Image: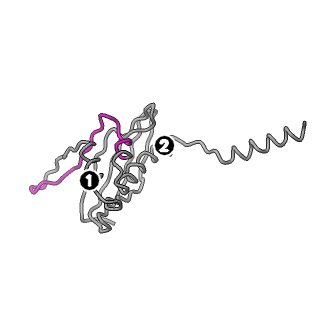
Amino acid sequence: MKKITLLVILQLGCLGMHVRAQTATDSVKAVIHQLFTAMIQADEKALLDCFSDSAILQTITKAADGSFTTQNESVAEFAAFIAKESKGNADERIQFETLKIDGPLAIAWMPYQFYYKGVFSHCGVNSFQCLRTNKGWKIIYLVDTRRRNGCK
């Protein structure tokens, strides 16, 4: 009986070593990584799964007079554009710089470099706001900057 009990304890202990709880930080990073994986894979469904139903996408643009404005795009338009691309065309390489979480709200700030069809296109910063839902973390707001100069 003692041998069986010891065997069960050892097996459970080994099983526990393979199970790692995912932290909130890991979960937020996972949904953001899913977005960029969906982009490079041209996977419309996986991309749409990253966003809440009411998500907002914006890009900060610079006008000819030097002023800045925002340009809005719907998640559906963005996903449809990505779906038309060949795999590997839309390659956005990110670096997590700041990630903050307070209960159901997370923000992430990350510099990026974007390559289109293997050629450097532009760089900038993404600013995400994410919401913890019953289905996991979802992106509710994404705004980015884009430039060709001053990139690393």
> Where are the magenta residues, as a range?
47-66
Q: Nearer the viewer, residue 112 or 85?
A: 85
- Looking at the image, which residue is at 36% across and 57% down? 40
Question: Image quarter for residue 76?
Answer: top left
Magenta stretch encompasses residue 18: no
Main structural element of the magenta stretch: helix, strand or loop? Answer: strand
Q: Secondary structure at mark 2?
A: helix
Residue that extends furthest to the bottom in the rendered view of this protein: 119
- Please state which amino acid type lies under the numbered disc 2: Ser
In the rendered view, does 20 fall on the left or right side of 15? left
Marker disc for residue 27: 2
Q: Nearer the viewer, residue 124 or 67?
A: 124
Q: Which residue is mark 1?
A: 145
Kind of residue indicated by mark 1: Thr
- In front: mark 2 or mark 1? 2
Q: Residues within 10 Å of mark 1 (few under 14, many from 20)?
A: some
Q: Quadrant of the N terminus?
A: top right
Q: Position of residue 115 (x, y in %)?
A: 31, 63
Q: Secondary structure at mark 1?
A: strand
